[in-house]
Image (cartoon, coloured by chain):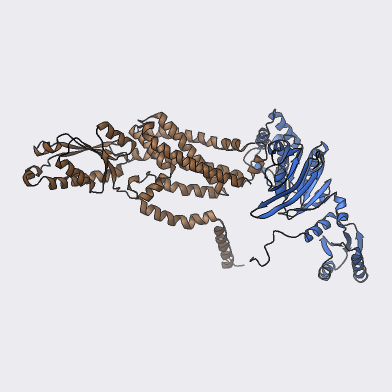
Amino acid sequence: MSLFSVSRFLAVLMKEFIQMRRDRVTFAMMIGVPLMQLVLFGYAINTDPRHLPTLVEMADDGPLSRAVIAAMDSSDYFDFVGTVSSRAEGDRALRDGTASFVVVFPPDFHRDVVRGLHPALLVAADASDPTAAGGAVAALSGIVQTAIDQTLDGPLDFAAGAPAPFSVTVHRHFNAEGETSTYVVPGLLGIILSMTMIMITAVAIVRETERGTMEALIATPVRPLEVMLGKILPYVIVAYVQTLIFLFAAGLLFAIPFVGSGWAFFAAFNLFVLVNLALGFLISTLVRSQMQAMQISFFLILPSVLLSGFMFPFAGMPGWAQALGNAIPATHFLRITRKIMLKGAGLAEIRGDIGALVVIMAIIVLVALRRYRQTLD
Amino acid sequence: MKEDAAISVRGLTKSFGGRKVVDGFDMDVPPGTIHGFLGPNGSGKTTTIRMMCGLLTPDAGQGRCLGYDILTEAQKIKQNVGYMTQRFSLYEDLTIRENLDFTARMFGMADRRRVVTQALSHLGLSGRGDQLAGTLSGGWKQRLALAACTIHRPRLLLLDEPTAGVDPKARRDFWDEIRQLAGQGVTALVSTHYMDEAVQCDVIAYIAYGRKLIAGAARDIPAQLGLHCWRVDGAGIDALEADLRRTDARVQVVRFGDVLHVSGTDAAALDALAARYGATGPQRWQRQDPTLEDAFIFLMDRAADNFAPPAGAAQ
């Protein structure tokens, strides 16, 4: 009797590898997924986003104004996507997310600079994501100085000297103090809901099949719809409880405001819960065991965290990664929560995100129903 | 099809992944009888049962169960059939009472509390209703499963290997229960591997590789096959067994404990064999009626294996 038999140990080791190879889902998780994630997240994540959509309110179109715009545009940080004619229009664009910045040139800007009146150039920034806005704001003073140097030479050289001929005032909207928690906490709700809803639904359905209780259940006169609703509704209630606790704690512990429409939030929340339940149901039709359901759910959580704009600025990601991020339900829901909680949005401002969730939901339900039919027989 | 039969199916066929699991299956089960359903593992018994109660849609064939069409009236069949699956299919993390109550609700029973209490006392588990079902022993789990699938007083029971892995005493209790139900007019279709259970059935159907090979009363089946049998015992039985297997492929040699059953359809050849070995060897040869098991092994050996990999396929 040897204390340690290499041959026995090798037999266990080989058996383990054989089983690993036979479990396709686990095998894919171990080999394919790390590589995919490395490539995906390595290239996608960028904490210093460029090309932020910027609007301009031109009350003055003198040479200096145009030079400032040209300098900002060529800096990579700002992409001018249009003009607005009023402050209200600019505010709306910031709230619904179509612009990250609105640059406001006051009337007679050029003339006031030349007269040495030191007018103020106003830059309104969407600071709900402090990281995304930070780089661009920091680069602003250098960009403006370049414009000044280039425009105010020759006869106007006198005006270019120190002190600066005009000031740049940055208004940070929605998160004036740049608190990270203000940015992170509303987004967290989407992540927490995704995580629990998808996993719990998938596991709850698969458990019934795995333990053999599903067969006895469908041998009774119970209808599939009764089973589905009965199994899913408890988790919807769990989601309600989670969200109530979450909102309460967010206000109490982190002083996160809730300035927008409660009804808009309620509508979006219900839609998001449905999308996640549908996704959990879809997973349950793809896997055979609770273990596999857990693995797939977990595999879906990572992009929800990294590509949704939850941890890293969405605007910083390359186009393909943004497209991918847009396919993730959490992306749209956390935009909705930030817009409603921080920016005071109502239904009008979250229309686009709601539409996206509806489209994602429709696709998931279609695929899930196809899969479900196949697994019945 | 017989109109008054509890089950009457014709030509049931079902394929999974391109291979026929059930092929052209016919069966008539008269009401109030116990019908045995035998066959090796993977022979299609479970699939057939599932098609009969409307859980699976057959690829071809038709039939009626309790007078309802198995293709279009699955809902009515489910309401009147008790189906006990092969695996323990109750919730292990619910108590015995909760399991029974849940099943009663699934069947829309009025007066659930009384029905559940009755079922518990009938099981002899009145004091243990709050015990988790998962903590019951194998035999008790099967009795609980039977109680659950009979709670709605079904007219037909479909029992899929209800006594697999259960100790002999619990098996006896289980069969007492089935016979008692049959006495009350319930029809039962029971699949099993145990011959002592099979002989308790009024009629037996034997299925292999998806086809029904034979059906009839237990005592008639060997005769239907034209099987003759000799019982051999005595010293040197091991050597004799090996010798017999080598000499004649048409003779079936089956061992029961320390006894050999030598059987075949050619009575004259068997007589000659018995005369030869009986004269020379130390063993005793006696003519006897072939048993059900002899008959089924005989059937099995003759049936073509449609699940075997095609010749030449890599293993």
Specify whether B45 is left or right of B251.
left
Check the picture and name the quadrant holding the N terminus of chain B. top right
Name the side, left or right, on which B4 lies relative to A54: right
Quarter-of-image position of residue A157: top left
Q: Is residue B172 visible?
A: no
Nearer to the camera, A376 or A40: A376
- Please indicate whether residue A96 sits to the left or right of residue A56 in the image: right
Q: Position of residue B34 (x, y in %)?
A: 81, 43
- Which image quarter holds the C terminus of chain B? bottom right
- Does B226 sit above or below residue B47? below
Residue B220, given in percent of the width and then of the height, sits at 87, 51
Q: Residue furthest top?
A: B111
Q: Could you say which is closer to the camera, residue A120 or residue B84? A: A120
Residue at image coords 54%, 50% = A292
Tell which of A353 and A313 is nearer to you: A353
Residue A220, image x and y in percent?
A: 67, 38
Q: In this structure image, what is the colour of chain B?
A: blue
Q: Colour of chain A?
A: brown
Q: Toward the viewer: B174 or A33?
A: A33
Residue A23 visible in rendering: yes
The residue positioned 40% from the left and 40% from the top of the image is A332
Q: Is residue A224 left or right of residue A252?
A: right
Look at 9% across and 47% down and name the residue there. Answer: A153
> Total of numbered circles in the picture?
0
